[in-house]
Every structure is written in structure tokens, then in C-alpha cells.
Amino acid sequence: MANLWTKKNPLLSMMLSGTNAWAGAARSTMTAQVRRQHSAAMREGANRVTGFWTAAMTGATPKARKKRT
């Protein structure tokens, strides 16, 4: 007599395949978003550091004072 617990279930197999496909699509979307945010943060940090050191080396001009009348 065959064991019913080890018998293949086509409905369960289709359900798990669909779930796996959905999870793969969701994972790739999240990974892409994380990479975009990481790149943007690194670019912003590099711009800030470059701006800071450029201003420090060139001696940024101070703001002009308002004239009192």
C-alpha cells in the first residue's frame, strides 16, 4: 500500500512554483531599489566631501555684508 503522505501533489507543486516565481520577482525589485538608493547615497556623500574640500582649499569667499543706510 502506498503512503499517502509521500505521494506527489500536482496542485501543491503548481502553487509552490507560482509562489516561487512571485517571490523571485519581488526580490529582484527590492534588490534593484536598494542598489539605486545606495548609489544615490554614495554619490551625495562624494559630492558633499568634494564640495567641502574644494571650498576649504580655494578659500570660499565670505558673504557680502548688507549696507546700512
Image (spheres, rainbow, N blue to C red):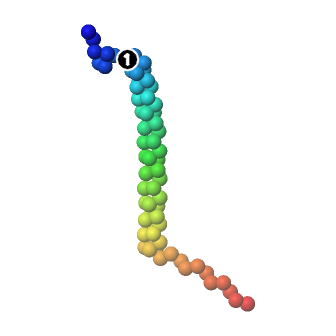
Position of residue 28 measured from the top left corner of the image (x, y, whole percent): 43, 37
Position of residue 50 measured from the top left corner of the image (x, y, whole percent): 44, 64
Residue at the image point whose x is 31% and y is 16% from the top = 4
Q: Would residue 13 be found to the left or right of residue 62 on screen?
A: left
Question: Can you say whether 68 is above or below 9 in the image?
Answer: below
Residue 30: quadrant of the picture: top left
Image quadrant occupied by the C terminus = bottom right
Position of residue 19 measured from the top left corner of the image (x, y, whole percent): 43, 29
Position of residue 63 measured from the top left corner of the image (x, y, whole percent): 58, 79
Image quadrant occupied by the N terminus = top left
Residue at the image point whose x is 62% and y is 84% from the top = 65
Q: Which residue is mark 1?
A: 9
Residue at the image point whose x is 29% and y is 18% from the top = 6
Q: Would residue 50 be found to the left or right of residue 65 on screen?
A: left
In the foreground, 60 or 11: 11
Question: Can you say whether 4 is above or below 38 in the image?
Answer: above
Give the residue furthest to the front.
1
Circle 1 — which element?
loop
In the foreground, 2 or 11: 2
Task: Give amino acid for label 1.
Answer: Asn
